[in-house]
Image (cartoon, rainbow, N blue to C red):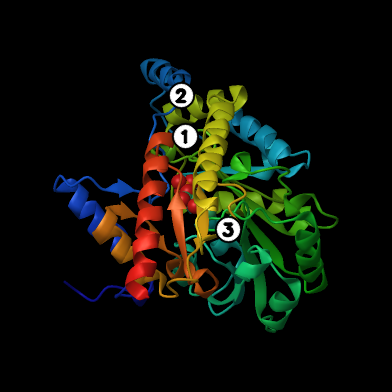
Amino acid sequence: MPKPSSRISGIVPSGKDGWEVHSAAWARKEAGEDIIMLSVGDHDFDTSSQTIEACVTAVRGSNHHYTPLPGLPRLRKAMAAASSACTGVETTPDQVIATPGGQAALYAAIQAVLDQGDHAIVVAPYYATYPNTFSAAGADFTVVETPAEDGFQPRADMIRAALRPNTRAILINTPNNPTGAVYSRERLEQLAEVCREHDLWLLSDEVYWTLGGGEHVSPRSLPGMAERTLVINSMSKSHGMTGWRMGWLTGPEAMITLLTNLNLVTTYGLPAFISIACAEALENRYGVKEIAERYAARRTVLLDAVRGMNNVNVRGSEGGMFVMLDISAFEPDDEKFAWALLDKENVAVMPGSSFGEAAAGHIRISLCQPELVLQEAALRLRRFASSYRREAA
Ligand SMILES: Cc1ncc(COP(=O)(O)O)c(C=O)c1O
């Protein structure tokens, strides 16, 4: 074939991507082995039946045509109401744009604020697609870690130290994937100060906002921040709708108008029947409370089961769909630990270092399994940890 563009070739550089343990576990599970998969963040249950019915009704009702580029008016109204609740800032439909999932919202946000060669700061540990989404924009970025011993909370002094003259944006995620940390108001206020002082955009990924423990603080609500914050939202996690591909961006109206031009050349609008079902699900919060309660219960079950384990420390793990365990006391090499756990106990987890240096010496455990499975996984982890120490001794 003729040479592909360097832009497309540069999105995912070849080589190791951190998902090796997961891929091997998946292959073994597909081959019939009894593997407990705790390595991915996709629900183990279906979308709410009310949303499914709304979609069936919509598809039978001739909703088979193009939709407006920024989203159906009813959908934008529902998204604006959800954004008002999520961010604590009264939001109008003109301040939101529908995208096919949170990932497309991330892509649009990065395209919207960074030119080729511009610089951004990515607060780590981060969701695995972040670096590649910057690469897709030809933008440069610096990873600023959040120390594990600080509960993976962002530190303004560390972010300040990474600023460059061409820094245009900071990307954060709270509640966080992979750590489960919920950023505190105080740390977000300090971060907001940096953004105001240096006239930066803040890209705030809040796709797990309904799964947080305690108060969700959106930096958009902080003084002077609504004009410089783009919030990434999604129905994937809150409404159990990963496969429906529905997300949205919230930001200043002028930026949303510009982003509509991006939809002109990318999505050209979203499917009508999906949009109608999503609007109804947002209006009625279908599944939201049940899903939040389910993850809160699972988090409690897993944390209770591991808290008694010697040499395993819980870090972050306040919200979202993941728990982060510090296993460095008996094995600093988290990848080695994850491989051995898979080989000896058939439990697949993600090595923390897949998500950045700050999470090295940790493992990320997904809560996307029923409580009984999580309990069984904790038992296997306990057995593994004690024999691991014996072998090491
Ligand atoms: C932090 C974070 N942001 C964004 C996404 C993208 O989700 P989606 O594209 O399904 O909305 C994910 C998915 O796991 C995530 O963990």
At 49% from the left and 60% from the top, the residue drawn is: 127
CA distance for labels 2 and 3 = 29 Å
Mark identifier at residue 109: 3
Q: Secondary structure at mark 1?
A: loop
> Is 3 on the left-hand or right-hand side of 286?
left
- Sequence order check: which comes first, mark 2 or mark 3? 2
Circle 1 residue? 240
> Is 319 on the left-hand or right-hand side of 86?
left
In contact (CB < 8 Å): disc 1 and disc 3: no
* Vertical placement of residue 233 versus 372, above or below: below
Q: Label 3 neighbourhood size at 10 Å, few (<14), some (14-19), many (20+)? A: many
Residue 143 image position (x, y, % from top left)? 57, 75
Q: Nearer the viewer, mark 2 or mark 3?
A: 2
- Sequence order check: which comes first, mark 1 or mark 2? 2
The answer as to whether callout 1 falls within 8 Å of ligand 1 is no
Q: Nearer the viewer, residue 136 or 298?
A: 298
Residue type marked 3: Ala
Picture quadrant of residue 44: top left
Q: Label 2 neighbourhood size at 10 Å, few (<14), some (14-19), many (20+)? A: some
Residue type marked 1: Gly
Circle 2 residue? 48
- Sequence order check: which comes first, mark 1 or mark 3? 3
Residue type marked 2: Ser
At 69% from the left and 62% from the top, the residue drawn is: 202
CA distance for labels 1 and 2 = 7 Å
CA distance for labels 1 and 3 = 23 Å
Q: Secondary structure at mark 3?
A: helix
Q: Quadrant of the N terminus?
A: bottom left
In contact (CB < 8 Å): disc 1 and disc 2: yes
